[in-house]
Image (tube, rainbow, N blue to C red):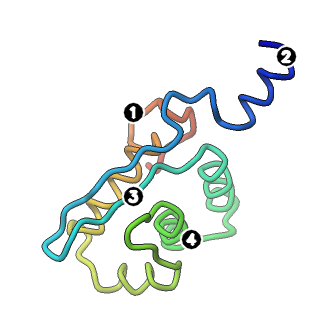
Amino acid sequence: MTDVDLKNALLAGEADEVTEEYRDVPTKVGAVRVRGLTRGEVLRLNGSRDSGEITAETWERRVFALALVIPKMTESEVEVWQGKSKANGVIGEVANAIYELSGLKKGADKSGVAGTS
């Protein structure tokens, strides 16, 4: 593989063992499917949060809007869900699945990006 081929493969995301991983979170009304965030998505979100540009609530809405596969939701829809959900309910289970897939759980080293502590 030439340097150019290697660079192109890295930029295309071909070096990752799994380019996209999904998890289904069962609920009493159906399964919610999520994906892990990309490193770029995590860096952008954390940068916005760390700079004070967005609140923790907005950060979570953006995470969900990016990571929800089934059903897809907008930030506004996630906000409605946040307002109607128990902290330790399904929304927490979905958040944990997203954080695990994205390497954002405490002690995770998948992404090399600081977690959500």
Q: Position of residue 34 (x, y in %)?
A: 39, 58
Report the number of discs: 4
Q: Secondary structure at mark 2?
A: helix
- Eye-nearest disc, 3 or 1: 3
Look at the picture and state if 8 lies above or below 98: above
Q: Of label 2 and label 4, which has the lower sequence position?
A: 2
Q: Pointer 3: what residue?
A: 34
Q: Secondary structure at mark 3?
A: strand
Q: Of label 3 and label 4, which has the lower sequence position?
A: 3
Q: Secondary structure at mark 4?
A: loop
Q: Is 71 positioned to the left or the right of 114 in the image?
A: left
Residue drawn 46% across and 49% down?
Answer: 36
What amino acid type is highlighted by mark number 2?
A: Asp
Q: Pointer 1: what residue?
A: 107
Q: Pointer 2: what residue?
A: 3
What amino acid type is highlighted by mark number 4?
A: Thr
Q: Pointer 4: what residue?
A: 55
